[in-house]
Image (cartoon, rainbow, N blue to C red):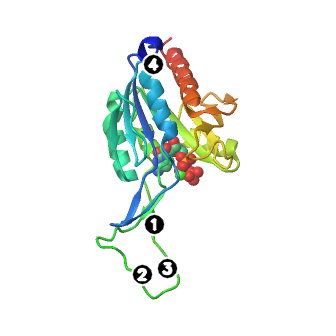
Amino acid sequence: TVRLLTPQDLAGETFLITAGPTREELDPVRYLSNYSSGKMGYAIALAACRRGARVILVSGPTALTPPAGVLCRNVTSAEQMKQAVLEALPQSTVVVKAAAVADYRPVERAVQKIKKGKPEQVEMALVKNPDILAAVAQAKTEQLVIGFAAETHDLESHALAKLKSKNLDLIVANDVSCPQAGFDVDTNLVRLFYRDGTSEQWPLMSKLEVADRLLGCVERLRSRESS
Ligand code: CTP
Ligand code: CA
């Protein structure tokens, strides 16, 4: 019924959306992760689906239920997320990377539970995870690519650097030091930076409103491309 009342302006598009955190295992009972809830990515998936797009959602572990009609691929680690994204990339027209990928993972995953030893202080060796967006930038053909940036300081310069280095069409920067824009809340305060150098500050709104407005931006970018 919702679909009947919503303009199907994204019909014909296939959205590849990533959401949630990744988990990097240390041993069978422990992992390294972050506070991402997946709410922003799931909101975009729901909004895109309502507007007629086909949606492939690659999701890290979250407490959320995938919206009906969305094809959901569940993954745990960054490495698995990268595989799932690269596999779905050729059939997608728009990529939205809302996931909070763990930047590092333990060098080794112990097969058995690591036992506490005598030392009061221990160190853990970590290795960098692949940058999934950078891999997408390399493998992409015609897709529109939208990234997110979670920042606590110097939002503009960091977001612009990511826009460029990850070869994005658009980056959505959120100041996660702000309580209404951080992880696990239902609202977001974002600033958008486009490839052409323009930017927009949006007022505080629900993640679902951010999702809908963002899809409007995607639609405009797509129609500009085809004209
Ligand atoms: N990202 C990714 N793969 C990674 C790390 C990040 O695809 N290994 C993507 C995120 O999904 C997001 C964007 O890159 O869309 C920015 O993520 P962010 O963590 O803000 O940037 P980083 O490049 O990881 O830089 P830093 O964490 O140092 O700020
Ligand atoms: Ca990061």
Where in the figure is residue 221, as x and y percent of width and height?
A: 54, 21
Whether pointer 4 and pointer 2 mark residues with C-beta atoms closer than 8 Å, the reply is: no
Horizontal side of 140 relative to 166 (left or right) equals: left
Q: Which residue is mark 4?
A: 51
Disc 1 marks which amino acid?
Leu
Whether pointer 1 and pointer 3 mark residues with C-beta atoms closer than 8 Å, the reply is: no
Where in the figure is residue 135, as x and y percent of width and height?
A: 41, 43
Disc 3 marks which amino acid?
Val
Disc 3, SS:
loop
Where in the figure is residue 46, as x and y percent of width and height?
A: 45, 28
Q: Camera-side residue: 65 or 110?
A: 65
Where in the figure is residue 89, as x and y percent of width and height?
A: 36, 34
Mark 1 or mark 2: whose residue is earlier in sequence: 2
Disc 2 marks which amino acid?
Lys
Whether pointer 4 and pointer 1 mark residues with C-beta atoms closer than 8 Å, the reply is: no
Q: Nearer the viewer, mark 3 or mark 4?
A: 4
Q: Which residue is mark 1?
A: 126
Residue most extreme to the left:
111
Q: Which residue is mark 3?
A: 122
